[in-house]
Amino acid sequence: MKRVLGLLILTLVVGCAALSAGAAAQEEGAENATAGPRVSIVEPTEGAILAGNVTVRVNLTNFTLVEPPGEPDAPGGGLLHYYLDAPVPANASAPAVPETGWYAASTNTTHTWENVTPGEHNLSVQLVNDDGTPLVPLVFETVNVTVGDDAAVMNLTAADFAFDTEAITVPAGAVVTVFFRNEDQGIPHNLAVYDSSLRSERFFMGEFITGPAETVYTFIAPSLPGTYYFQCDAHPFMNGDFIVG
Ligand SMILES: [Cu+2]
């Protein structure tokens, strides 16, 4: 009896597994059949901090880039419109040319905006037909990024409850990238930047990492030159001058 019950349960389990696998396959098939053209921005990511030139890289699904542009009626194909600080055009009967901001028509899945001014920007990419009109329904993606003046890249290590430097020097307004390494086993450290050791204003607070571990911090340096302050928030005796030149 025990054996029969066991077999019965086994049969039930196998049967259920086969059923659900079948259902999953069916669902997937339906999804592929109904999926329209899509564009996604692979780079930069939402909220990214960048310096100088901004390269946008996209992924296309169910859409073919047609070259040369301007040839009508290629089914399932067309062009990419890259936008910088421009509202994505939505009028289906006119070429997708934004009223403000910049745009570029392209048959490449990457586009570089050069010398983007420091500050906050939005980057969009839209799929358009080969006559330049938007695909309907509209197919686009937008990300928001922050662009800094200049780039400063450095290493910083925390070991034996001390940083390996007493001063960090960066250009004003620079995008600062810190390759941070914590060598202290089981101990959390971070990097944080303040106006002074009084810590009345905070410019950056890095996530804690527990050693041994590494991370990359990216932030924008203060825009006013001066001597600021950095520390580990868990161990404020680990500190130094953050010099903005
Ligand atoms: Cu610490």
Image: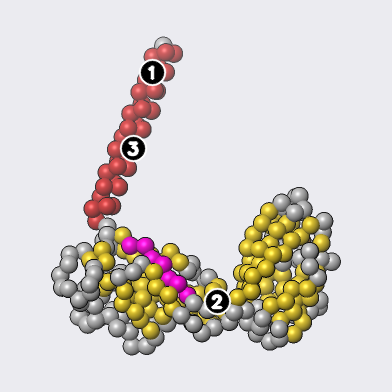
- Tell me the residue that label 3 is attached to: 20
Is residue 86 part of the magenta span, yes or no?
A: no
Using the numbered discs, state the Cα–Cα distance from disc 2 to disc 1 in whole angstroms.
65 Å
Question: Which one is earlier in the sequence, the residue at label 2 or at label 1?
Answer: 1
Give the residue type at disc 3.
Ser
Q: Position of residue 205 (x, y in %)?
A: 68, 69
Tell me the residue at 72%/70% (across/down).
192
Is residue 59 part of the magenta span, yes or no?
A: yes
Q: Is residue 79 left or right of residue 226?
A: left
Q: Residue furthest right?
A: 237
Question: Which one is earlier in the sequence, the residue at label 2 or at label 3?
Answer: 3
Badge 1 element: helix
Badge 2 element: strand
Magenta span: predominant SS is strand
Tell me the residue at 60%/75% (across/down).
151
Q: Position of residue 93 (x, y in %)?
A: 20, 80
Span highlighted in magenta in the image:
54-60
Give the residue type at disc 1.
Leu
Q: Quadrant of the C terminus?
A: bottom right
Mark 2 touching mark 3, by CB under 8 A? no
Using the numbered discs, state the Cα–Cα distance from disc 2 to disc 3 in whole angstroms.
49 Å
Give the residue type at disc 2.
Ala
Among the 4 quarters of the image, the one containing residue 155: bottom right
Q: Which mark is residue 51?
A: 2
- Looking at the image, is mark 2 or mark 1 nearer the viewer? 2
Q: Residue furthest top?
A: 1
- Tell me the residue that label 1 is attached to: 7
Q: Quadrant of the N terminus?
A: top left
Badge 3 element: helix
